[in-house]
Image (tube, rainbow, N blue to C red):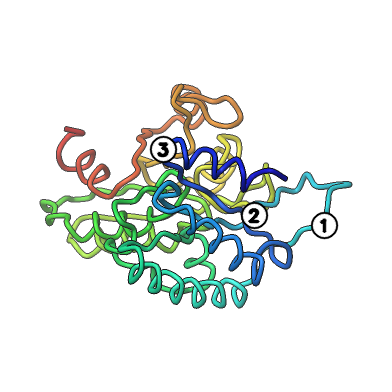
Amino acid sequence: GDIRSQLATLAAAGIEMHCQLVLCPGLNDGPELEHTVEELARLWPAVASVAAVPVGLTRYRAGLTELKPYTPEEARRLVTWAEKKTAAFRAALGNSFLYLADEFYLLAAREVPPASHYDGYPQLENGVGLVRRFLDDLAGLTAPPPATPAAFTLVTGTAAAGTLKKLAAWWNSFPGWEARVLTVPNSFWGPSVRVAGLLTAADVVKQVSNARPPGPLFLPRAMFSHAGLTLDGWSMADLRERLGCELKVALWPHEVWSELVGGGA
């Protein structure tokens, strides 16, 4: 209840803040979101950036407040509104200030903004700008040498599958390469949890065992903690032993290129 005064105190102390808004349809979006963003903008430059991410709803919600996920139409309306707000902020502040999570653009089937929109990606760890960074990194790849045959599989969650398919299509445009994307639904947290960073090893093992895709398999680095463990406590060694295939981790297209062509250098 005291968040405004607390933010003002931090701002007065010269502390730079990067804020995140977890948007719940019908609760804190619409006029409430407009008000929140405007209040935070009053504290710029102490509040340096604001990210808006969609609420993540797991299947473990018995007895909790009723919440619903965003629909594609709601996501489209939000993106349209945000485009107008960021244009105004760029004119007034010199930067976008407000940044929507990539999930909103993917759900709305809208193209993510250019790199200039993200002003150095201050909210990258919150899933804001990852798709743009990925696509720009893909655009900078150089053609690989011919390979016969060279098959590999990119593993990801349902949200990023379309983006990963662009990387696979790039590889498949060169003779001798066979790239596939294996999409892993999230059985552990529930199907509405779509991001790769919340995949569990058990779900990956189940999907890989059923599909038996060509290897090596590239797993998303985001599903591993800094200690090298998945959310259900598996290490890469555990996964290799269980799956019996070559496993690698990557985040960006150039890392995949490096592993396949440059020997991981």
Q: Position of residue 220 (x, y in %)?
A: 42, 42
Picture quadrant of residue 234? top right
- Give the SS element for disc 2: loop
Quarter of the picture containing the C terminus is top left
- Residue ranking furthest to the right: 63
Residue at image mark 3: 14
For marks 2 and 3 on the same chain, the one whose residue lies earlier in the sequence = 3
Please name the residue shown 38% across and 73% down the image: 87
Q: CA distance from mark 1 to mark 3?
A: 39 Å
Q: Earlier in the sequence, mark 1 or mark 2?
A: 2
Q: Residue at 46%, 72% (x, y): give it.
A: 85
Q: CA distance from mark 2 to mark 3?
A: 30 Å
The type of residue carrying mark 2 is Val
Residue at image point 36% right, 36% down: 249
Binning the other alpha carbons within 10 Å of mark 3 as few (below 14), some (14 to 19) or many (20 upward) gives few
Vertically, is 72 above or below 147?
A: below
> How many numbered circles does the render carry?
3
The residue at which mark 2 appears reads as 55
- Report the disc number at residue 66: 1
- Nearer to us of marks 2 and 3 is 3
Q: Is residue 31 left or right of residue 170?
A: right
Q: Are marks 1 and 3 in contact (CB under 8 Å)?
A: no
- Give the residue type that dot 3 points to: Gly
Q: Residue at x 59, y 68 (%)?
A: 34
* Outermost residue to the front: 12
- Is 157 on the left-hand or right-hand side of 192? left
Amino acid at circle 1: Glu
Q: Say left or right for 9 vs 57.
A: left
